[in-house]
Image (tube, rainbow, N blue to C red):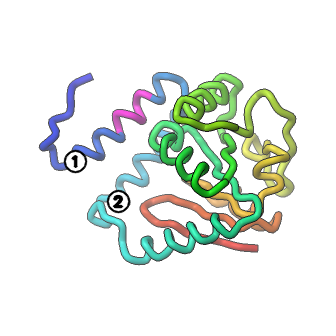
Amino acid sequence: MQEIPINHPRYQSLLLRKKISEAHKAGVLAESGMIAHGRGEAFDYLLGEKTIPPAKKAIEVAAAQILLAKNPVISVNGNTAALSAREVVKLSHKSGAKVEINLFYRTPERLDKIESILRKNGARKVLGTNNEEHLHLKGLEGPRSIVSAEGIHSADVVLVPLEDGDRAEALIANNKTVITIDLNLTLTYGP
């Protein structure tokens, strides 16, 4: 793949695209994950590629929610693993939050690859893997309803990147506070 010139006005954006493309080729990211990234990137362009003041305030609220939680969980999908595995693990270590893989396009191979990425970045324990029993989250259909008993199922606060809404609604209905990060905005919802 062609090297990205460091002086390109969209250098950081192009680096992220490259990571997304490589993750898809490696089988970590579902094809639709590339679309999800593009959707967020387009919105970021509209905002001028900066974190807006309301988002900064929401980030502070989200951090407080995680720190005050009894059982916080960080939900990881392919995009999160590809772009910010190191940051997820760092947040987990600093906050005590558990890390759980939760995928819409769930396959045993993707679970193994994402678990491997998280462990290579220092995760001590990863939930939602092929090696544990799972429960189904009440009120949610499909593969994302498959959750860890120790993680999302018993969590009081769940950090969910790239949320489409149905999972957030189900989590809230199950008395969980939900923090979503999407389109350069952090939102916190509670039961």
Q: Among all residues in the image, which is located at the extreme left? A: 7
Question: What count of labels does the image hold?
Answer: 2
Residue 57, percent across and down? 46, 76
What is the three-letter code of the residue carrying label 1? Answer: Arg
Range drawn in magenta: 17-22
Q: Is residue 46 magenta?
A: no
Check whether the beta carbons of the residues at disc 1 and disc 2 lie within 8 A of each other: no
Label 1: how many residues lie within 10 Å, few (<14), some (14-19) or many (20+)? few
Residue at 71% over, 66% down: 69
What is the three-letter code of the residue carrying label 2? Answer: Asp
Q: Nearer the viewer, residue 60 or 102?
A: 60
Quarter occupied by residue 20: top left
| Figure check: 39 above or below 130 | below
Q: Is residue 26 left or right of residue 49?
A: right
Which label sits on residue 66?
none
Quadrant in the picture for the N terminus: top left
Quadrant in the picture for the C terminus: bottom right
Residue at 64% over, 60% down: 165
Which label sits on residue 44?
2
